[in-house]
Amino acid sequence: MKMPRRRLALFGILDRYVAKLFLSAYLVALMMIVGLYLVVDLASNLDDYLRPNDQGTSPGILAVARYYTLHVPFLYLSVAPFVTLMAALFTVAKLQKAREVIAALSAGMSVRRLLLPLFVSAALIAVFMAGLREVATESIGFERDALRYSLDKHLAEVEIETMRVKDVQGEMIQLGSFRPGIGVDPRGVEPSVFHDLDAIRFIDGNWFHFVAERGRWIGDHRVGHWELEGGYQERVSDEDRIRTPLVQLDGQLEFSPRDVWSAWKGRGNALELSLREARSLSRRDPDNVQYQTLMNYLVTFPLANLVLLLVGLPFLMQFERGRGTEGLVAGFLLCVVYFAADFVTLNLGLQGHLDPLLASALPPLFFGSLGLVLFGSIRT
């Protein structure tokens, strides 16, 4: 006898039951995977982080604890698709152990309809990932990055030597050094500071040379202005040079501390850029294929939550005795291949050997298509 139609309605009792199982499994998988990584990383780096520097000072355990607290959202973003897959596998395994899959099939429900709540949940997680990356980077990313830099370099205060950054017009600015703020808290009372600014601009038919010994940021890390010490602009022509003192940068060279830090991060830790940062850097440097690849990748990577379910779950839906474990291993290995392919194509795109759109879209398109074929072959 087929299940009554009213019970097949979306968000009905069965959908809520499967979604509840998935949510509980997701929390377990999340704590297991993220917790394991944190323990391993902390055990590997704690002694080095707490080791005194050449001046005999140490950041202290509170700074380390604060860094890992701020790092948790970014760690989650890197492993979220795998957490989704593990939670879905746990959910299906529990349904099979209780013979609820066979009961649903006997009642006339297809496997695809039974597992629909898992895919809806995966889609919501993909959207959540995209939003979390932007919010976390905007709110705590600057401080997290500075803390990690100070812990890695054993510095009480972060200072980057010889920094180049492009302003909103895409023109190059060179800084002798840049300090975003106190290492343990870049949002603290100490302002962002640069030394030895040097930039040349062609404005209204004249060349201008901008120089400053020191700049101090007034405002938050995105909105404000630079107050200068020893600053001037020099108009250069064939006839003469006219030097005018500058006490602040207000429209001549448009860049903020966040812009400087994003440019530095884009060179050394590009995968940790947010979509907003990658888009901003790409506008300033449109010929840089690295930023173009990252913009596409940050859009397609959350789709891995859905792709991994399409690839992994069909192998688990084996009803012959002893085939469930084999299917679980096969599905897991295929997902590992997906991450390997994703890593290879991304690096080819970042190095300019593959079109930026193709580098980011090829793995989800290929494995997503394969997953649809596998899912369509499930016995139901």
Image: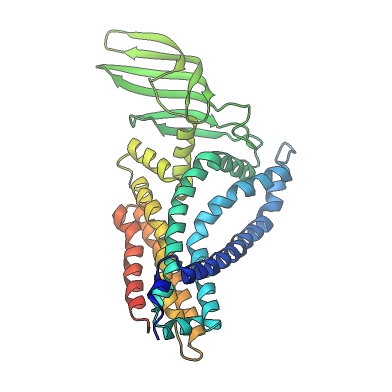
Residue at image x 38%, y 38%?
A: 280
In this view, 97 is above or below 196: below
Q: Residue furthest left?
A: 205
Residue at image location 49% in from the left, 43% down from the top: 135
**Image quadrant where one finds the N terminus:** bottom left
Does residue 332 sit above or below 108 in this rendering? above
The image position of residue 55, as x and y in percent, is 72, 36
Left or right of 244, for residue 79: right
Viewer-nearest residue: 120 or 214: 120
Front residue (pair 162, 94) = 94
> In terms of image quadrants, where is residue 206?
top left
Query: Which of the colour schemes (rainbow, by chain, secondary structure, one colour) is used?
Result: rainbow
Residue 11: x and y in percent read: 44, 65
25 relative to 5 in the view: left or right: right
Does any portion of residue 145 appear in the rendered image?
A: yes
- Residue placed farthest to the right in the image? 56
